[in-house]
Amino acid sequence: MKQGLEIIDSIQKKQNVTLEKLRFLLETQDKEVLEYLKHLASQTTLAIYDNHIYIRGLIEFTNICKNDCLYCGIRKSNTNAERYRLTKEDILSCCHTGYELGFRTFVLQGGEDGYFTDELICNIVSSVKKQHPDCAVTLSIGEKTFESYQKYFDAGADRYLLRHETANEAHYQTLHPSELSLENRKRCLRDLKDIGYQTGCGFMVGSPNQTIETLYEDLQFIRDLQPQMVGIGPFIPHKDTPFAAKPAGTLDRTLRLLSVIRLIHPHVLLPATTALGTIHPQGRELGILSGANVVMPNLSPSQVRKKYMLYNDKISSGEESAEGLKDLKQRMESIGYQVVVARGDYK
Ligand code: 5AD
């Protein structure tokens, strides 16, 4: 058998990748090897999750953030961002709409906004769970203490998304202000897992200063943490950030990494992210065909969507939106997959 194909088989068998194998897979231009990578990754997903695509209704409930991450459009020092907060009633109304459409997971995502105290978050979480006991609630609200995470969990939160962004210390420092540390980020992820959340980490593909070596560290971090979810999407510059002039991550590299993540961590819930849909009109479908099995359409009220601008030209309508669900279903069917009405827990 050809050497490139053997490399892919060995990654699948060992559920691990070496730096040299990763370099080979990210650099090869051999079409047959790349087809085989996709093939094995998507077969792996099909064997565990069938052809089912899980959908998550994303509610971006505040774009106010105390952090100043260099890549992010809603960073504190971006005075051009028009800030907003949704009320608890707004959030519940989004969930109601989403439930009718067939969503059984709601992702409450926001900046690190002190207005939303632990008490308020718990109140919102328990209200959503009370109205929709058959649904999962995912929080994505940043770094908190163990005690806060425990309170949200006790209030009914099932899952938590917190991308680690990069597992390399020096790289982490180039993406974040000095108040933030990789050490605390990792502490948060461990706490979340210990408490019992289905936990998601992840990173941007092609973030400034990322190398194959730092990506290798990301993959080792994933192997070590064993998260239930991994979110990756291309870095896309935002015009009002220090990284405005940096090049975006590529579709091709993101797809290759989705496949590698599927092979080294077969059961992971792996979204074809909004950023992937933003850089290519068929990004979502290509992501699924590379091993992803989750899509997260936007359920936020339409008047605030343009304000949650993490990066330039972030999509929020069409197949990306909850109203565009019919289109999303058709797109998934056209590639042999079906959108299901289910919580879509980790298997
Ligand atoms: N490009 C792509 N993804 C971004 N995120 C933040 N800013 C950008 C950007 N410019 C991602 C981060 C964060 C998630 C909510 O959005 O990885 O964790």
Image (cartoon, helix red, strand yellow):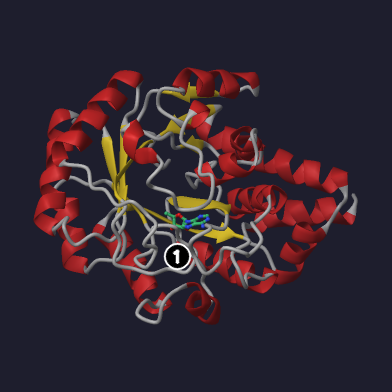
- Taking the view exactly as shown, the residue that stands out farthest to the front is 80
The residue at the point 41 percent across, 41 percent down is: 306
What residue does disc 1 label? Answer: 164
Residue 121 visible in the current orientation: yes
Name the amino acid, label 1: His
| Residue at 33% from the left image edge and 35% from the top image edge | 303
Quarter of the rendering containing residue 164: bottom left
38 sits left or right of 126 in the view? right
How many other residues sit within 10 Å of disc 1, few (<14), some (14-19) or many (≥20)? Answer: many
Residue 274 lies, in percent from the top left, at: 51, 42
Indicate yes or no: mark 1 CB to ligand 1 under 8 Å.
no
Q: Secondary structure at mark 1?
A: loop
Q: How many marks?
A: 1
Residue 268 image position (x, y, % from top left): 49, 47
User: Picture quarter containing residue 220?
Assistant: bottom right
- Residue found at the far right of this picture: 2
Vertical side of 160 occupied by 223: above or below: below
Residue in front for this viewpoint, 167 or 13: 167
Q: Position of residue 315 (x, y in %)?
A: 51, 38
- Residue at x 42%, y 51% (from the top left corner): 228
User: Relative to residue 50, is residue 17 drawn left or right?
Assistant: right
Quadrant of the frame with the C terminus: top left
Q: Quick check: 235 left or right of 192?
A: right
Task: Depth check: give the residue in front, 177 or 53.
Answer: 177
Tell me if I can see residue 271 in this picture: no
Q: Is residue 91 above or below residue 61?
A: above
The x and y percentages for residue 305 are 38, 39
Q: Is residue 54 above or below residue 175?
A: above
